[in-house]
Image: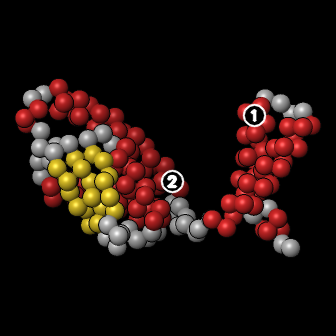
Amino acid sequence: MSRSFWLPMPLHSLLLFVAWLLLNNSVEPGHLVLAAFLAWTIPLLCAPLKTDQPRVLKPLLAARYVLRVLGDIVTANIDVAILVLGPMRKLQPGFIAIPLDLKEDLPITVLASTISLTPGTVSAEVSEDQKWLYIHALHITDEQALIAEIKARYEAPLKEIFGC
C-alpha cells in the first residue's frame, strides 16, 4: 500500500498529534500512544470525504484581502452603530440578489462569509445554480451601488486569489 493510503494527510496528522498533547499538557507514554493513534486514524477515516478545492494562488493578495475585510468590519461597526442609534424609520432594510462570477464552492463560501462578517449585511442563500448570492442589508440607499461595491471590493480580489 502506498504512503498516501497509510498517512493521507500528514500535516493534519501532525497537528492532531501536537494538539492532543497540548490539550492534555502531558508527554507521558500513554498520551503519546493515544495521540499517535488519533493522529493516524482520524485523517485515515476522513480522507474519503476530502474534496479538491481551488488553491490560493496569490497569498500576498489573500493577506491584503484579510486586512481589507478586518478594516471593513471596524468601519461597518461604526456605520451600523450610527444607523441603529438614529431614527429607526430612516432605515431601509432589504434583500439583494448579487450575480456571481465565481464558480467554485470555496471562493463563493469565502465571499458569503465575508459579507456575513461585515456588520449590516448577511448572506442569506446561494442559488442552486450558484449564479446568485442573496444578501440582506440593514440599510440600502442604492442597490446597484451596493452590488458594484461588493463585486469590486470582495468578489474581484477573490477571483484573482483563487484564479477563477
Q: Is residue 140 placed above or below 6 in the rendered structure?
A: above
Q: Neighbour class for label 1 at 10 Å: few (<14), some, many (≥20)?
A: few
Asked which secondary structure carries label 2, the reply is: helix
- The residue beneath circle 2 is 60
**Residue farthest to the left?**
89
Q: Amino acid at mark 2?
A: Leu
Q: Is residue 23 placed above or below 9 in the rendered structure?
A: above
The image shows residue 12 at horizontal and vertical percentages of: 71, 53
Q: Quadrant of residue 138?
A: top left
The image shows residue 35 at horizontal and vertical percentages of: 81, 44
Asked whether the residues under the numbered discs 1 and 2 touch, taking CB atoms below 8 Å apart as contact, a structural biologist would say no
Q: Is residue 9 visible?
A: no
Q: Quadrant of residue 53?
A: bottom right
- The residue beneath circle 1 is 22
Residue 83's disc is: none
Q: Amino acid at mark 1?
A: Leu
Mark toward the start of the polypeptide (1 vs 2):
1
Left or right of 73: which side holds 90?
A: left
Q: Residue at x 31, y 70 (%)?
A: 131
Quarter of the picture holding the C terminus: bottom left
For marks 1 and 2, give the CA distance. 31 Å
**Residue farthest to the top?**
85
Q: Nearer the viewer, residue 78 or 26?
A: 26
Q: Quadrant of residue 43?
A: bottom right
Q: Residue at x 79, y 62 (%)?
A: 7
